[in-house]
Image (spheres, rainbow, N blue to C red):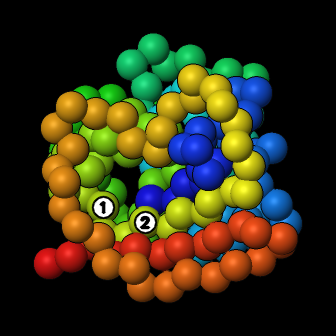
Amino acid sequence: MCMISSVDGAIALDGTAGPLGGPTDRELFLHLHRSADAMLVGAATVRAESYHPVAAGQSLFIFSRSGNLGEHHEQLIASPSTRVVSGSVAEVVSTIPANVCLLEGGAVLNGQMLSADLVDEVSLTIAPRLVASQASRIVVGLDVPSNKWELASVCEADGGFLFMRYLRSR
């Protein structure tokens, strides 16, 4: 799972995560995105962040009940790499033929994946901003386990951005 949050826990500024980030955060996200075999993302995130089709050799799994993919709907649907899915995250994930899946949010999908015990690693950027808004947290859900996570690495860059990598405790 790869997410960004402000110091006070907001995952969006003016409706999108992009303005929270800095140059290193963008590079880290792109590195993780390009390194994954498959990306999993909720349709609300696809719409808010104006997702495009992914590179050849990768797959984009968009979880959607409505099928509304926003501004680039036609491009996404036309791409052989895009799969629009719904239903149980555990069932969908069990069908993905990939070694590395990157969960790119949003908060509801993150909660569903955590509830299904399908997240092994969390890459979290803390932006040095206080947003003071009603924006979601990185995880929303009723059945999210309170498992402990082990801090595997932490780094500071770009004037106060913290980059943390957590691994699931076994």
Q: Is residue 44 above or below residue 25?
A: above
Q: Is residue 3 above or below residue 74?
A: below
Q: Is residue 28 above or below residue 147?
A: below
Q: Quadrant of residue 107?
A: top left
Residue 122 image label: 2
Q: Nearer the viewer, residue 153 or 105?
A: 153
Marks 2 & 1, CB-CB < 8 Å contact? yes
Name the spot of residue 20 as percent of width and height, x first: 75, 48
Q: Amino acid at mark 2?
A: Val
Q: Quadrant of residue 72?
A: top right
Which residue sits furthest top? 66
Pointer 2 local density, CA inside 10 Å: few below 14, some 14–19, many at least 20: many
Q: Amino acid at mark 1?
A: Val
For the C terminus, which image quadrant?
bottom left
**Is 98 positioned to the left or the right of 133 in the image?**
left
Q: Residue at x 53, y 73 (%)?
A: 164
Q: Which residue is mark 1?
A: 119
- Whether residue 79 is visible here, answered yes or no, is no
State which mark lies toward you, 2 or 1: 2
Name the spot of residue 56 as percent of width and height, x first: 65, 62
Q: Look at the numbered disc 2 and give the secondary structure of its residue.
A: strand
Name the spot of residue 2 as percent of width and height, x first: 52, 59
Q: Residue at x 50, y 85 (%)?
A: 153
Q: Nearer the viewer, residue 22 or 33?
A: 22
- Whether residue 165 is visible here, answered yes or no, is yes
**Is 141 positioned to the left or the right of 157 in the image?**
left
Q: Look at the numbered disc 1 and give the secondary structure of its residue.
A: loop
